[in-house]
Amino acid sequence: MPVITPHVSRTRPSYGLRPADRRRDRIMKYVITGSGFAAILAIILIFVFIGKEALPVLTSPEVHQEVTLSKMVTPLEGRAGKPKAYIWQPVSQVPKYSLPPLVLGSLKATLVALLFATPFAIGAAIYSSEFAPRRARELIKPVIEMLAGIPSVVLGFFALIVLAGWLKDLFDWKYRLNATTAGIALGVAAIPIIYTVAEEALRAVPRQYREAAQALGATPWQVARSVVLPSAAPGIFAAIALGFGRAIGETMIVLMASGNAATWSWSLGDSVRTMSATVAAEMAEVVHGSAHYNVLFFIGALLFVVTFLINFLGELYIGRLRRRLTGSAA
Amino acid sequence: MRRTLRIATAVGITVALASAIGLAGNAITIKGSDTMVILGQRWAEEYMASHKGAVLQVTGGGSGTGIAAMINGSADIAECSRPMTDKEKQEVEAKRGKKPVEIATALDGLAIYVNTSSPITKLSKTQIKGIFQGDIKNWKDVGGPDADIIMYSRENNSGTYAYFKEHVLQNEDFAPECQTLPGTASIINAVSKDPKSIGYGGIGYASGVKALLVSATDTTEAIEPTEANVDSGKYPLARYLYWYTLGEPTGDIKALVDWVLGPEGQKIVSAVGYYPLPKKASAANEKTKTAADQ
């Protein structure tokens, strides 16, 4: 085999041998490594800060006079003569912090978001990976990803002004601003994420599977339904998980369009108060170091842990998918 | 050539940033009540137009947010639609070294709003309390059509929320079904779109909705939130809108406060839809000043 020799000047040393060049390289290496580690450090520090401010809810006796973990999850004494219920009323003569209505509110809005977004996103992913001609696929992908660029406050505004009235007339609900109005706007925000990941999962299915099915006489829909979808199923679940993570953490849309009423009800047509909207609405005024402040950070920490775990697991699986696509793993 | 261009750009950006920071340095920051934010912004516009060199920044966020901003140093003046509590006054003094001084700047009648299509014209304070606590669930119990009542309220950092809770709900809790919206404008928007709803907010926002006549008890006469009734105190939900300054106002802030309390500032109060201070309010300001000194 011929040996390839690099061109090296014989009249002066090549770059990299002079001490000044090596020093400059070393400095740049440290700067870039430092920046990379700074980003990781920032995430760790955010988690530490939130945890530190949320910890008094579990440990401080002063906070326990006002709220304890058990008081946050069991029904509370409300008005005299009325049965105990889950009440969220932090600014009151007797402050009441019940978590269940907030958690249920987040879950209801996210459920509607996923129910709305998944058919559209997965359908678009199947279309663009199985049925679309190449030109259409090159158009669809960037357009759906443009949806991701819409600011959430614009979606919230749209839901509040346009969607709320229209949906109320359509379904004849009692409330204009409820879990479903907010959920649909959340779904629009989640569609790009679910689409991108699902489309990658579908493309990762080896071409041989499709060709084998076609050779046996399957139509494109049969190929998609019985061969491609089942083998891409784990990736599609990862896509839905990432969509869940996006929807549950979204704040502006639910703040504007969900009605923010902390009710304990299973109906999707009722107003809900999500965890993210609670923190956003109440954090600005709360007195630093008070029990209310600590409870808000506790809710924030809860939200952080849930979304972090789901996104982490989702990304782990996406990493495996990508390596399979580029052929560097089995 | 390239090197000089780079140096020139760096110097230019630094100068621009410094001048921006310098300008912002002598701005007067006013934060707080959403009820007062439009009023504050109109005052700021007129004041800056007539006094060259003055820079005012006005933001909302709720009375509680304004007080918190004053405590942590990011606001010079806190706009509040409710009086500061003693605990808050102590915190301002502890963190910033001076007592807050309360200055009444305008009068407001906290209005109860319903949709213009609603046949209801008046309610008593007890009925309003019953509605917002969830005891009265249907409009027919207060003389309206057979329909569920949809309630709109403010978030709990709002001075209007605190005032309503204290004076109407007698410090009891709101019903959990009460939807909470950020700001009086969004309540008005929601009430104007929902024929079966009820909400509350400052009288300055009344457009596209109907303000109800309120009676103090079930047997007394229902009063309309007009200027005369709010001035004389006949309207049961009349309240002052306050500015809190850090210590007695001096220099630029004193000039601003005097202008706001003077005829031009009070004319803007009327234009925005609130009610100017009655003549005896200057006496009210004297009283609060001496009380704060103790």
Image (spheres, coloured by chain):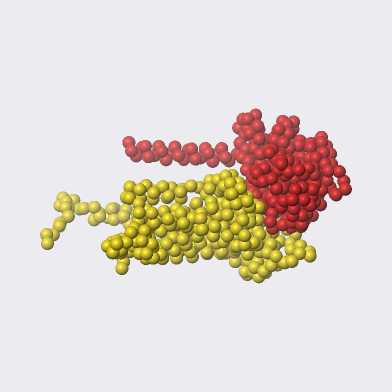
> x, y (%) of residue B243?
71, 43
Whether A45 is drawn above or below B275: the answer is: below
Q: Residue furthest right?
A: B219
Of the pair A278 and B242, the residue shown nearer to us: A278
x and y percentages locating residue B172 in the rendered image: 76, 57
Left or right of B126, for residue A229 = left
Q: Is residue A34 visible?
A: no
Residue B277: where, in percent of width, then height?
78, 37
Image location of residue B176, percent across then percent down:
69, 58
Q: Quadrant of residue B245?
A: top right
Residue appearing at x 24%, y 56% in the figure = A17
So how many labels did they put on this image? 0
Quick one: quadrant of the N terminus of chain A?
Answer: bottom left
Q: Going 46% across and 48% down the picture, which residue do you hit?
A: A147
Question: Which is more toward the observer, A205 or B189?
Answer: A205
Left or right: residue A228 versus residue B51 is left
What residue lies at 73% left-to-right and 31% top-to-bottom? B267
Tell me the quarter of the picture where residue B178 sits: bottom right
Q: Looking at the image, is B57 positioned above or below residue A228?
A: above
Q: Nearer the viewer, residue A13 or A291?
A: A291
| Residue at horizontal 63 percent and vertical 33 percent from the top | B45
In this view, the residue farthest toward the left is A2
Output the letter for the chain in yellow. A
Q: Is residue B16 above or below residue A220?
A: above
Whether residue A187 is visible: yes
Q: Which chain is red?
A: B
Along the line of sight, which residue is nearer the eye, B119 or B127?
Answer: B119
